[in-house]
Amino acid sequence: MIARLTTGVVRRSTVLLALLLGALVAAPWFVNDYLLTVLILILYFAYAGQAWNIMMGFAGQLSLGHAIYVGLGGYVAATLFVRFGVAPWLGLLAAIPIAAAAGAFIGFLAFRFGVAGVYFAILTIAFAEFARIGFDHWDLVNASSGLFLPVREYAHNDLWRLRGDPTMFYYVILAATVVAFALCRLLLRSRVGYFWLAIREDEQAARAAGIDTFRYKMYAVMISAAVTAFAGVFYAFFYNNLFPEQVFGISRSIGIILGPIIGGVGTLFGPILGAFVLTGLAETLNSVMTAFGLDLPGATQVFYGICLLLVVVALPDGVWPPLARRLGVAEDGK
Amino acid sequence: MTALLSLDAVSKRFRGLIAVDRVGFTVPEGAIFAVIGPNGAGKTTLFNMIAGAVAPDHGAIVFAGRPIHGLAADAICRRGIARTFQLTRPFPALSVEDNVTIGALLRRPEVGAARERAQELLHRLDLFDKRRRIASTLTLPDRKRLEVARALATEPRLLLLDEVMAGLRPTETDRMVVILRALNRESGLTILLIEHVMHAVMALAARVLVLDHGTMIAEGTPETIVHDPAVVQSYLGAEAV
Ligand SMILES: Nc1ncnc2c1ncn2[C@@H]1O[C@H](COP(=O)(O)OP(=O)(O)O)[C@@H](O)[C@H]1O
Ligand SMILES: [Mg+2]
């Protein structure tokens, strides 16, 4: 396992990764509460973007409805916690298969009946909308009035119940991001990863090379959904509230995919870099506006739009590939 | 020699047009068999049906004793038929080596072993020095070689080659002939090739099938084919032999 994780890595990239990780581990000692919250948000988007990237970046299947897996993960764990007192880590054991099953259902419908490309993307939006409407009317999860997790002042951090201060949540999402990164690297260097790339590049040629494209696309959706489910659990326990309108909304799905697009679709580090660039700049913009007493609703969205436009026009492969070449750590052709 | 592939009255119609009309022939195990004919004769469509890219409307295709018509392309490849595309279809953003490694992963699930096999094949196809190049940056002759390497990587019993000599210079054509003959001789690989370069056909094929407007107009040894009046009339007359 370890050998597999490290083979083929330029030593320089290992060093840079270690430095970054070291800085992130040390960060809570040096940043204030506000910055820590921003870092949590960045890592949350890095994690969710990484999960989305498995489907789109590796296997070439565009999901514009990834909020459905966030929402399912969050609602499953939060409902189990609020109604039955089940700890989130146990809830995760239910959330993961449920999200994966939802992914399998959507994938099966699409791939069996040849729904591809733009139509596939629209189908993923439709299912996220179904979920939003369904949860909006489901009393077990408090329907549209939202599900709230009990917030109390905790004497100490309770990692098992995910009740505690932002520092604890920060380390949880940092660990999750590291695990997701390692998992993606492992996947990309394994047989399934190569088959995904083949499907992304040319599905007909992939089939001619003997690849059961239906099966491998199903793996991509299910793994991506399963990984995304944890983002939902984290979201629910960090923010302590869930509203169908918000968690399943299309803007949530878009929020997940902007990071990897800015950073570099299909790269391992792109989702992380993209989250830093996008959320980092957006928060800077927010504080600058606050400092000047400006209140422009929608300014963040406009800002995201401009970022996206700049990247699509100037760096169509995202920020990471050219930066990686500059740093001499190019991800060997991928 | 036993039959590895046999077609019986295979037909395919595209809207009004009959692209392939009741074509039947048998390729013995270990043979090199050529299909020639003018553009639009239905050669690629014939390949697409054998490889499972399109399903025949009528007829039977039997490979290694089992019917394969109607199977999906990936299932047919797993049975042991690999094909190249006339209009090459590499995995464009991937390196040459990764392209071939993907093919090799079919029978060798371990990435290291698949990569080793890919490198052997890249040596054979004179692509080893270009193994780190991104496939989309290759010249046409190199892309043709890459198609062959990737197909071979799936370890087929039958290799379908769709005009792999087209666009090659004469020296490159000769080189490809040598490579293919060596593959055939060493491993007993059966090869079915569509080819316009007649001297490659003459050098390689034991038997030749001539298609014109979807129908078979002749089948035989290369020597009998080039003297067949119908073939000279419809095809060879128009092209330089
Ligand atoms: N997918 C398709 N749809 C419609 N017509 C096709 C299709 N594929 C091939 N054809 C037609 O079938 C005929 C045979 O084409 P093809 O098999 O490519 O010939 P060849 O390879 O001998 O040049 C041509 O007239 C071509 O236009
Ligand atoms: Mg053709």
Image: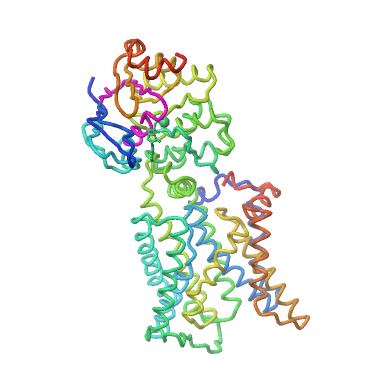
> How far across and how far down the image is residue B45, in percent?
36, 34
Q: Quadrant of residue A178?
A: bottom right
The quarter of the image holding the N terminus of chain B is top left
Q: In the shown orientation, is residue A210 left or right of residue A24?
A: left
Ligand 1 quadrant? top left
Where does the image place residue B150, in percent across and percent down from the top left?
Answer: 45, 34
Q: Residue at x 48, y 62 (%)?
A: A63
Note whether B44 is above or below A139 in the view shown: above
Which residue occupies the foreground of this view, A86 or A286?
A286
Which residue shows up at 37% across the image and 14% down it? Answer: B232
Q: Residue at x 47, y 58 (%)?
A: A118
Please provide percent x and percent y for residue B39: 42, 27
Colouring mode (rainbow / by chain / secondary structure / one colour): rainbow
> What residue occupies the far bottom of the structure in this picture?
A152
Image quadrant containing the C terminus of chain B: top left
Residue A40 in the figure: left or right of residue B79: right
Q: Which residues are magenta?
A: B25-49
Name the residue nearer the viewer: B154 or A169: B154
Based on the picture, tell me whether residue B28 belongs to the magenta stretch. Answer: yes
Query: Residue A142 versus residue A7: which sits nearer the camera?
Result: A142
For residue A25, above or below residue A269: below
